[in-house]
Amino acid sequence: MFRYLTAGESHGPALVGILDGLPAHLRLDVERINQTLARRQGGYGRGGRMKIERDEVEFLAGVRGSETLGSPVAVLVRNRDYENVRGLMDPITGAGKPLTNPRPGHADYAGALKYRQRDLRNVLERASARETAMRVCLGAICAQFLEALGITTRSYVHRIGDVVSPELEAFSQDDVEASDVRNPDQATEAKMIAAIDAAKAAGDTLGGVFVVRVDGVPVGIGSNRQPAQRLDGVLAGALMGMQTVKAVEVGLGADVAARPGSQAHDNFALEDGGVVRASNRAGGIEGGMSNGQPIVLRVSVKPIPTLMKALPSVNLHEQTDAPATIVRSDVCVVPAAGIVGEAMVRLALVAPVLEKYGGDSIEETLDNLRRANEAAGALFTPAKEGV
Ligand code: EPS
C-alpha cells in the first residue's frame, strides 16, 4: 500500500515528509525536484516570504546513491524564516503574544475551538499554504516514478479573478513556465497581472482557476468496484485537500449538466484498426477508470482570506468587534496553486497505478505494465486460424 504524510509548521524549523511504498531502484534526479520546488515559489502576486525562502530537498532515508531502496523515503525542506522567529516558534521554548482576531474564510476560528487553542497562531501555522512546499517535494519524487511509466502531468492558469483565458487544448509547457502568471497567452497574461496589481492596491486578494492535464495514463487506472476507488473521486479528493480549493471539475465538469446526452459524450470510431475518440468531454475518466485519453481537471481556488484591508471580525479574547488579524501574505496564489495541483494529482495517482501493476522494484512494475499492455492489445484482435 502506497501512502504519504507531511508534517511541519509554516514558521517552524522545517517541513518533513514520508513516502511509503515506492518501488526500489527508482533513479532520482534531485536537481529536478529542486526545480519543481522553485516553480512553486514563483508566480506574480506572492508576498515577501518568498524572498526569504529558497526551498531545497534534503533526503533523510529510503534513498542511496540516488536510487530508492524500497524502504520509506523521508525528506526535509527547511523554513529559512524560522531563524527570524525562533523566539516565537522554537518547539521547546517558543512563546509570544497570542493572535486573537480570526480571519473570515481561514482555519483560524474552527481550529481554535476544535483544538482548544486560545492563540490562533497554533492553528494558522499548520493551516498555512507553506505546507504545500512539502507536497510539491513529495509529488516531484512521484513524478519521476510516473514518468518511468510514461505518465506526465502539467498545468496552466485558466482564470485569475474575472480575467478568463481562452481554452488551451494543446499548450507548450515552456511557454507556461515563462509566464509570471503561468498563462502562455500574452494578452491574457497582461490582464491577469493588471488584475493582481489592482487587487493589491485595494488591499484585496484574488482567486481563480487552474487546469491540470495528465498524459499517458494507461486504460483502467482506478475502479468502478467501490465508491472510494473511482479515479475521479480520488483525484478530486486530493485536489480538494489543498488549502483554498473550492471546486474540481473533470472534463466538461459542471457544464455537462446542461447538455443533452448527444452532446455530452465521446463517441467511438475505428481508425487504422484501432478504437479512437473524436473528443475528450469526459476528461479521460469513464466509470471511475482512466479511459486512455488525457485526464483534464479544472480546479477553482478561492481568494486567500488574509486581506491587507482586513475583513470585519471579532477579538475573541476581549469579545469585541475588531478587524481580522493582518499578517504578511500573498495577493494571489493561483499560479503557485497550479504547481501544488500537479503534485496532488501525482501523489493521488501512485496508489491506483501500483494497485494495478504492483511491483517491489521499478523493473517489476514496468514488466507488469508491458504484459498488461500486450494483453489489452490482443484482447479484441481476431484469433488466427489454428491458434
Ligand atoms: C501563508 C502566508 C505567507 C505565505 C505562505 C502562506 O507566509 P508568511 O505568513 O510567512 O508571510 O508566504 O506561503 C509560504 C510560506 C509558501 O512557501 O508558500 C499562509 O498564511 O497561508
Image (tube, rainbow, N blue to C red):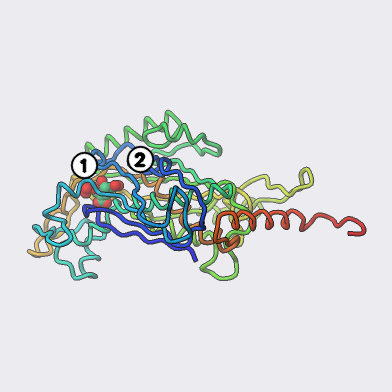
Residue designated by label 2: 38
- Residue 305 makes an appearance in the image: no
Say which of 133 and 108 sits in front. 133
Q: Which of marks 2 and 1 is nearer the N terminus?
A: 2
The circle drawn on residue 203 is 1
The circle drawn on residue 259 is none
Residue at (41, 40) in percent of width and height: 31
* Amino acid type shown at disc 1: Gly
Total tally of numbered discs in the picture = 2
SS state under label 2? helix
* Quadrant assignment for the C terminus: bottom right
37 sits to left or right of 175: left
SS state under label 1? loop
* Amino acid type shown at disc 2: Ala
Q: Position of residue 44 (x, y in %)?
A: 32, 36
Q: Where is residue 268 in the image (x, y as percent from the top left)?
A: 72, 51
Mark 2 surroundings within 10 Å by alpha-carbon count, few (fewer than 14), some (14 through 19), many (20 or more): some
Q: In this view, does 115 lie above or below 22?
A: below
Marks 2 and 1, how far apart at CA: 27 Å
Check contact, mark 2 vs mark 1: CB within 8 A.
Answer: no
Q: Where is residue 7 in the image (x, y as percent from the top left)?
A: 31, 60
337 sits to left or right of 70: left
56 sits to left or right of 286: left
